[in-house]
Each structure stands twice: as C-alpha cells, then as structure tokens.
Image (spheres, helix red, strand yellow):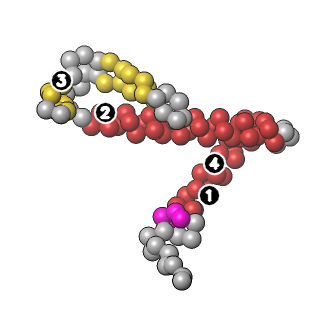
Amino acid sequence: MRSLQDPSEDGNGYLPGVDKRIAAVTRALRRAVDATVGLNCSFAERERATMEIGNEAERRLLEEELQSIAEAHGEDLLINGILYREFRPGSHQYASLCGPLGISRGWRA
C-alpha cells in the first residue's frame, strides 16, 4: 500500500520553502566557521567551531524570542487566578538546551 505525502510538507519533511532557508543558514554558518578557524584546520577544529557558533546562534535566537514574550506582557499577569504585578526591574536566567537564556523585565517608559 502506498502512502500519500502530506501536501503541507516537501520531500524532506520540512514545510515548503524551509530547505532553501536552511541552505542559506548553512552558507552563513560556513562563512562564520571559515572566519573563525580558517580553511587549513583539522576536521575536529571545524566541527568544534561549527557546533559552538551554531549553538550560540540558536541560544541568542531563543533568548530574543523569550525576551519579546516577556516584553509583550503587561505590568499585571493573571496566572491560575493569582494576580502578579510587576513592581521592580529584574532579570532571570532560564535553562535551555543551548545554554542559559537571560531575560530582563523592567520599568516601562
């Protein structure tokens, strides 16, 4: 029995157009690795640089996303029937698979 491919995905299991975007990210990552370790290094050095740069880029993206969520909340939050009010600036680090995500909340202008 033949199964039909989900029309919302391409042949790689990605949403349409994502493969081209991944290719663009890959090219940018290659440029960053080349600039970091050069072209005449070992595969191990390239692999280490690739993982460090990629992981840091992912961590920064997630941190920006979480910060934008924090900024979208008002001064008052109602969680499980309990009202929480922002009363002073503060920051907190949240754990992530990519490393700590530092988020700040502060006085609004």
The alpha-carbon separation of the residues under discs 2 and 3 comes to 13 Å
Residue pointed to by mark 2: 70
Residue 98 position by quadrant: top right
Horizontal and vertical percent position of residue 37 = 77, 36
Disc 2 versus disc 4: nearer the observer: 2
Earlier residue among tags 2 and 3? 2
Res 88 → quadrant = top left
Indicate the secondary structure of the residue bearing disc 2.
helix
For residue 85, the mark is: 3
Task: Please name which of the two marks, 4 or 1, marks the residue nearer to the observer.
Answer: 1
Q: Earlier in the sequence, mark 2 or mark 4?
A: 4
Task: Assess disc 4: are there few (<14), some (14-19) or many (≥20) residues with their C-alpha within 10 Å of its C-alpha.
Answer: few
Q: Dot 2, crowdedness within 10 Å: few (<14), some or many (≥20)?
A: few
Under tag 3, what secondary structure?
Answer: strand
Where does label 1 land, which residue? 23
Which amino acid type corresponds to the residue marked 1 in the rendered image? Ala
N-terminal-most mark, 1 or 2: 1
What is the secondary structure assignment of the residue under circle 1? helix
Structural distance between the alpha carbons of marks 2 and 4 = 29 Å
Q: Amino acid at mark 3?
A: Arg
Look at label 4 and name its amino acid.
Answer: Ala
Can you identify the residue that label 4 sits on?
Answer: 28
